[in-house]
Amino acid sequence: MCGIVGYVGKRRLVPVVLEGLKRLEYRGYDSAGIVYLEDGKLQKYRSEGKLQNLENILGEAFGAHSHIGLGHTRWATHGAPTTENAHPHSDCTGDLVVVHNGIIENYHSLRNELIAKGHRFASETDTEVLAHLIEEYLENDLRAAVTQALERVEGSYALGVLWTGLPDTLIAARNHSPLVLGIHEEEGGFLASDIPPLLPYTDQVIFLDDLELAVLRADGYSIYSLESGEEVKKEVETISWNSAMAEKGGYKHFMLKEIYEQPRAIIDTVSGRINPETGSIDLPEMNLSDKDLSQIDKIFLVACGTSWHAALVAKYWIERWAGIQVEVDIASEFRYRKLLINERVLTVSISQSGETADTLAGIRLAKKLGSKIVTICNVVGSTMTREAHGTIYTHAGPEIGVASTKAFTSQLAALFLLTLFLAEKRGTLESDERLLLGKELIRLATVIEEELPRLQADIQKLIESYYDSRDFLFVGRGLNFPIALEGALKLKEISYIHAEGYASGELKHGPIALIDKDMPILGLTPKDAVYQKSISNVEEIKARQGRLILIGTKGDTHLKTITEDVLYLPEVHEELNPILYTIPAQLLAYEIASRRGCDVDQPRNLAKSVTVE
Ligand code: AGP
């Protein structure tokens, strides 16, 4: 998705904005631009492709005396990724510029209206309409003009505005697209689509809510409701992420760093939430009373992509340990089917970013139907956390790599806590069993930390005969079926190898036709309740010369009679195998993608946060 950075303060504008845009690259983009105000004039520069192309245009002296401006990285939605379509966009006078993330759904009619009034457009974008619309209403009050313009707009926006007539002020506004302010009494005022650009300068942030407008100056800010026009008081949040956390920390890629951060992320997500004496689970931010909980007789889990895989695992857990029926939906499908949802249903959305448009639309629909909403999310103050009734934050820290790793295993940890919490409230799990499972979850983090270096070394050797495969199958049964899906998604999204995840038992219903000596298959075969059935399935693959990689329990020598390529993992409580068995699947995808020279952190066509439908 697009990235926005704005600044007003004592520092030189250009370095602050360029560094900020670099920290947003993970959001995915295909062009970039910057604008700053110097000697009363707006200087605007834009380029296609990567940020480096924009930096190549900007010489050292550019903006030497400028301390206010905006930057943007664009992920094309309307109009090709060309320089003309890159933001910032200007009005007819060239004295007003905007940067925007989101989609103006009624831009066609607005554009025709403005053209009829004599406005001249220079791009194919929906965004440029905003510049001309503000111009149309602008006399001498920029905030009023932006407010009037946005009253005409349907759709989503995170917007930054700069006008030569108000040379010390940035205007920002948001609706269904994230925007956060950074404030600091020395450094000045910042605005950005996400937290990383703010981290080198301040940990004091304000998350704008939908239909809010901010007036930002070097010495302060004010925030207004776009609906009432009244000034609103917002909470200033302190971000615990330091700048280093958002850097690579010495790893080759953010993704590898984040794979290794998983033990920490799981511990941070669990800590303080399991009473070490009683095994009682404490999730106060869920904001659900015992009465709310007592009337729940069904749970819907709604998510996309990797987060949907976490939901699939949670279905097994919640139904087994809490005795509540669970339905799992892909959010983009959930929205369009007849939903039998009422106040007796709890809807849980799972989202690393908290901004995924499909998942947001899903919870809004469920809420309208009477359901309480809880979201499991990794970003403090993101839209989903502010629209849900309650939140269970994962504490994975910033996840920069587009392919989700630590956020996923943290989601699983949080979902396991939710399972234990529900079981406790419904009396379906004794405290000693809860305590045991809670302790096993904490022990798991240590197991992962110990195993990671050896696993990575084993996998680096293993992939030499697999990295140039054209296809890959992943198979798992029971709790490990969703992990087969996740392993396949990881591989395809960063290495571009076609990969599919299947329930092991499904192979004989068609996919086994794919098996031959050229087809690599990764089988998840821990010593668990369905072990014998899983072994039968991989024997069927061996009988057809499939190239098997097996991941199984340390000491299970039988696996070596099936294939040479075996990765062993320590025994943990079998309910927690989904978290543990995700790790080698992530490392396999990472090592193969690296070996293929792929852009591991920013895979082609992908965005970290899918804020468009
Ligand atoms: C994860 O590896 C993928 N990049 C993607 O499937 C992601 O899980 C999905 O877009 C959902 O994102 P969210 O968790 O931020 O809602």
Image (tube, helix red, strand yellow):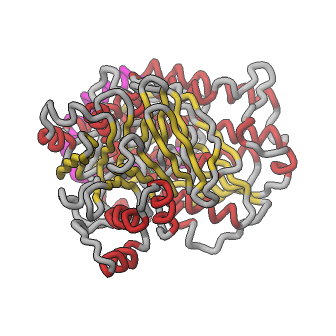
How far across and how far down the image is residue 18, in percent? Answer: 27, 36
Between 421 and 9, the one lying in front of the other is 9
Measuring 55% from the left and 31% from the top, which residue is drawn there? 395
- Describe residue 29's horizontal placement relative to residue 232 as left or right: left
The total of numbered circles placed on residues is: 0
How far across and how far down the image is residue 16, in percent? Answer: 31, 32
Measuring 21% from the left and 31% from the top, which residue is drawn there? 64
Between 139 and 359, the one lying in front of the other is 139
Measuring 40% from the left and 30% from the top, which residue is drawn there? 258
Measuring 25% from the left and 57% from the top, which residue is drawn there? 94
How far across and how far down the image is residue 352, in percent? Answer: 50, 43
Highlighted magenta segment, given as a residue range: 452-481
From where the camera sits, is residue 545 visible?
no
Q: Is residue 213 above or below residue 524?
A: below
Q: Is residue 461 magenta?
A: yes
Residue 130 picture quarter: bottom left
How far across and how far down the image is residue 190, in percent? Answer: 42, 36
Would you say the magenta stretch is mainly helix, strand or loop? Answer: helix
Residue 576 picture quarter: top right
